[in-house]
Image: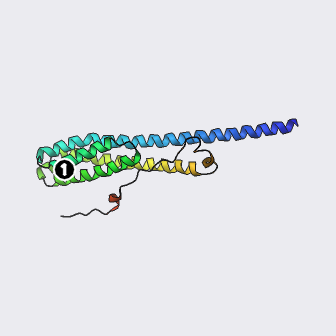
Amino acid sequence: MNKTLIGILAALVVIVGMFFSSYNGLVTMNEDVTGKWSQVENQLQRRNDLIPNLVNTVKGFAAHETEVFQAVSDARARLGGAKTVAEASAANSEMNTALSRLLMVAENYPELKSSTNFSQLQDELAGTENRIAVARRDYNQAVQSYNAKIKSLPTSLYAGMLGFEKCDYFKADEAAKNVPQVKF
């Protein structure tokens, strides 16, 4: 009888230990997703900070392009106010469109394109766009691992009860899936 009780207690300790280990793994994965998202936000903020300098540089050469400047300003405000991954994704798409329009305006001003300040800002923006792409990729990979874990057995049996819910991917806007038209 004593050996049976010890066996049951040992099995119980092993089961509880596995539960705690699994729980701690979920917490770690959830924090990884949160950390990766903060890197996406960090890079989006970097781009948001560069944009006023770029806009002001272009304004000096093309003051009459107010519609384009307003579109950039509006997109920047929406991106800064995004609260969820879906809102940030939509605002990011809007920002990409507005920046494309701004850079198209710059193409019409050869003296602007030759400006050192404008070139440096364009290079900074291009570098930031690359950083955003890497941060989005890292975030989506962390989300994929986390979502797979909470959907897998036996974790799926208790993950929801413990407050671990599916995370959203950072998705491209539908318009980004279309091939851009380049016209000369």
Task: Residue at 27%, 44% (x, y): give it.
Answer: 76
Residue named by callout 1: 68
Task: Residue at 50%, 51% (x, y): give it.
Answer: 144
Regarding mark 1 in the picture, which secondary structure is present there?
helix
Q: Position of residue 67 (x, y in %)?
A: 17, 50
- In the image, residue 68 sits, relative to residue 23, either above or below, namely below
Taking 3 as reference, is 95 left or right? left
How crowded pointer 1 is (Cα within 10 Å; few <14, some 14-19, many 20+) is rated as some
- State the residue lying farthest toward the front: 161
For residue 104, which quarter of the picture? bottom left
Taking 66 as reference, is 39 left or right? right
Report the number of numbered marks.
1
In which quadrant is the N terminus drawn? Answer: top right
- State the residue lying farthest toward the right: 1
Q: Position of residue 79 (x, y in %)?
A: 32, 44
Task: Residue at 42%, 43% (x, y): give it.
Answer: 37
In which quadrant is the C terminus drawn? Answer: bottom left
Task: Residue at 64%, 38% (x, y): give it.
Answer: 20
Taking 17 as reference, is 182 left or right? left
The amino acid marked with disc number 1 is: Val
Taking 17 as reference, is 103 left or right? left
For residue 26, which quarter of the picture? top right
Q: Position of residue 54 (x, y in %)?
A: 21, 44
The way the protein has been coloured in the rendering is: rainbow
Q: Position of residue 80 (x, y in %)?
A: 31, 41
Quick one: 174 or 114, which is closer to the camera?
Answer: 174
